[in-house]
Amino acid sequence: MAERELPPPYVEGSKPPGAIGEPSTSCNASCSMGVNSVFQPSTQQHVNYVSLYSKHNAIAGSYIINAELPGSPLAHTAFFGKRHGRGNYMKSNVTPNASFHTRYGQISLNLATAGGTSVSNKAYVQVSSTHGRVNVNMFALQPGKHICLEVVTRHAPIVLFVPPNYQGALHLRTRKGQVKFLPAFANQARVINADDEGALVLFGEGEISLAEPTTDGLDYCSLVSRHGKLTIGISGVDQLETASDDSLIKKLGTLVVGPQIMRTVEMLRERSAMMRQ
């Protein structure tokens, strides 16, 4: 009987230093204060079919999304069953692999994709906050493990960093806010459609002009806010300067852990393949 193939683990403790963390301080400071809850875990989480919802609590953490892991459809279905009448933000009509929602709290996430096979797949992630700002650092995408990310706010700004190997489209919409590209992202992004409320942007190499939420082999991001500003940069390259040293993220773009993690994943996959031969 063949052994069950396990996904290559990310090294514990490889959570990006200075990563997005607590609503009023950095992750390093919050960890030293002993903050650890269901909404703000202090360790890196390897997940599939996870749903977090709170009216007032902030949501923060580092999540490695592996669409190949077995999930718990009972809890996931119960969560979305209650929200279905108020609208599901996932426009692609696909049950998300991870969802994070809050009404008044802030959301600060480090996201990556992973898997234990060479089969290409896509992780679907949705993030929404009515009044709190949303910060997402997509610090690593394992080759062949793509992502469809939808982020929605009503009044608050959205900050997104994509990894250098992101390959696909970004759909940006804000009625009364602004769209800002940080320098490195601006140099590589291709705007193919724009108006006063947003833009459709391509980022990455290859044939990506047909990227849609469910397109195989490509990434897709949708950022939507009624009044909030949208800021997009490249993880590990762009820098996000803030007005105060005590702000949530002073230089989020200086994170460089993503490529290191991906090298670790590839090494473990090669070692696992050699052991099976």
Image (spheres, rainbow, N blue to C red):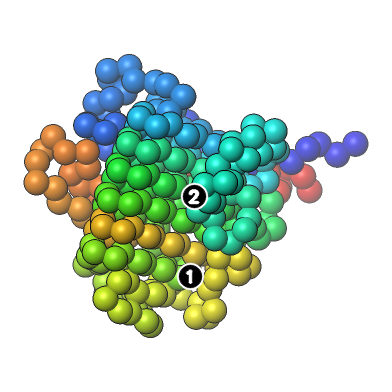
Q: Nearer the viewer, mark 1 or mark 2?
A: 2
Q: Amino acid at mark 2?
A: Gln
| Rendered-image quadrant of the N terminus | top right
Residue 45 horizontal/vertical position (percent): 50, 33
Q: Choose between 35 and 96: the one closer to the eye.
A: 96
Residue 2 horizontal/vertical position (percent): 86, 39
Res 142 visible: no
Image position of 232 with respect to 87: above or below: below
Give the secondary structure at mark 2.
strand
The label number, if any, that marks residue 43 in the structure image: none
Q: Residue at x 58, y 46 (%)?
A: 84
Q: Residue at x 26, y 76 (%)?
A: 196
Q: Choose between 56 and 248: the one closer to the eye.
A: 56
Q: Residue at x 29, y 65 (%)?
A: 175
The label number, if any, that marks residue 168 in the structure image: 1
- Mark 1–mark 2 Cα distance, whole angstroms, equals 17 Å
The quarter of the displayed image where residue 237 is located: bottom left
Residue 30 horizontal/vertical position (percent): 28, 25
Q: Which residue is mark 2?
A: 126
